Amino acid sequence: MLLEPLDLIVFIGYCCLIVGMGLFVSREKKGHVKNSQDYFLASKALPWWAVGASLIASNISAEQFIGMSGSGFALGLAISTYEWMAAITLLVVAIFFLPVYIKKGIYTMPGFLLDRYDTRVRTTMAIFWLLLYVFVNLTSVLYLGALSLNTILNVPLGYGIAGLAVFAMIYSIYGGLKAVAWTDVVQVFFLVLGGLATTYIALQMVGEGSAWEGLGLLRQEVPGHFSMILDRGEMMIPDGKGGTYDAYQDLPGISVLVGGMWITNLSYWGFNQYITQRALAAKSLDEAQKGMIFAGFLKLLMPLIVVIPGIAALVIVKNGIDTGFIQSMQDPVSGIIKSDRAYPTLLQLLPVGLKGLAFAALTAAIVSSLASMANSTSTIFTMDIYKKYIGPNASETKQVAVGRITAVVAFVIAAIVAPALGQLDQAFQFIQEYTGFISPGVFAIFFFGVFWKKTTSNAALTGAAVSIPLSVLLKWLAPNLPFLDRMGVVFLVIAALMVLISLVEGKGKDHPNSIEINSELFKTSAAFKIGAFIITGITAALYIIFW
């Protein structure tokens, strides 16, 4: 047990606060029975700051704290591209996609596909998303969270997985999105404060007492880890099995800025249920857009919290500053230094009290994402599968009950599968690659669905159907092609197929379900414009500095 009594008090206090708050906000007024809008869209009453906080709490999870710190250890600052490009992506989604979603009054992303295309497209994508959320997202977050418990508290992996699943279920399954979103506001506070504390202590250790000097020493000791654009052969990184591979495979140079990274970012932030669901639950379009701006500013801050600690851990290992630290970085079975053990090991360096706060921050990131993913899984299953094929006449109360049962089943399946991820060195890259099998098709379907009136249902169905097979085929035919570039190639092929099918089938006519686009739809407030200008300027400056 590496937590002192004070640390445990801080951590237990955090757990009680989250569970108590989740149950408190889940209460209903006397005589009111929770309906589907209450459960799945938080009664459409979220203000901008709750939307923004919930977006970040849902996004920043073990895959960032542990996975991205692990990638920082292996790859360096270049992995921050995911965060900084996300800030710009949030602006694009807020301007061009949110107005369409909110105008349609949808509950789910498959629901939009039904409105724009037909039932076949809606059902196909609903099944894809359910499989992705359960077998990739929930599974990886449970595994990485349990890994931190194992490293910090020596909790067996299986017990850690079960404990995190139960914790997330206690407050989220009863209250639905309302409980998840409002507790996320508190979670973000712990996440940022605890994360910054860990970064400060890690830099102090590198700088022999001075965090500022430590930050400067990072660039001196590992200058290659501060390059944002990697060339082929520039950096060889651990593969988790004792060997190495080219970091270009994960971040392929300039195509990161102009290629597949945009597909994965827009698919995640624009067409991903457990992200867009927060914006759909906002009081109004203006509140939703302001929430996206708030989330964008927080994304700019994230590399300081989740990437810099990983680079600091590399310097500590490289210079042999702490032999205990190095031993903790090693896999207990193989003895190989594992990148994903960087962040949990850093937590052990924190002083009493602060360690409990940082551990609470990590747990906050884990359980908020678990709760969000489970809630969105239950939303898609209930609204797009159950209500359509099993219980079309189900009452509001029945729909809420089905949503709760679905969330429990999703947690159980993910907990069973999670231990299989133990063989990976960088779980963050695993998540990006296998999510990328479906992302090109998702992006094409939504992009053409919103902006090209001639896109037909059969074209969209083809895009959905071929995304995974094409990705698998290209991975087999060109194993050395970086997965981000592969996503770009697959998208171009799908786009060509969809255009061809639409033109041949539709004979040049607009689809009857096409969306009317006009300039009025994309107008934003002055506050949004100012925030967007500042975020764009900061992002451009960061890339210029670290090019």
Image (cartoon, grey):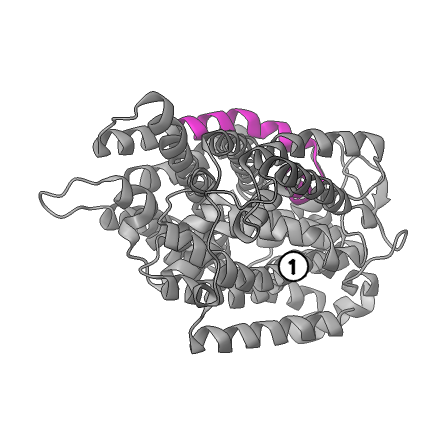
What residue do we see at 79% from left, 64% from top?
A: 227
What residue do we see at 68% from left, 56% from top?
A: 310
Is the residue 241 above or below the residue 528 in the image? Answer: above
Mark 1 packing: few (<14 Cα in 10 Å), some, or many (20+)? many
Element assignment for label 1: helix
Left or right, 44 with respect to 251, comes to left
Q: Amino acid at mark 1?
A: Pro
Main SS category, magenta section? helix
Question: Residue farthest to the top?
Answer: 390
> For residue 338, which quarter of the picture?
top right
Question: Residue farthest to the left?
Answer: 31
What residue do we see at 52% from left, 68% from top?
A: 297
Left or right, 531 with respect to 264, comes to left
Residue 421 is one of the magenta-drawn residues: yes
Is the residue 363 above or below the residue 461 in the image? Answer: below
User: In the rendered image, which residue does mark 1 sit on?
Assistant: 309
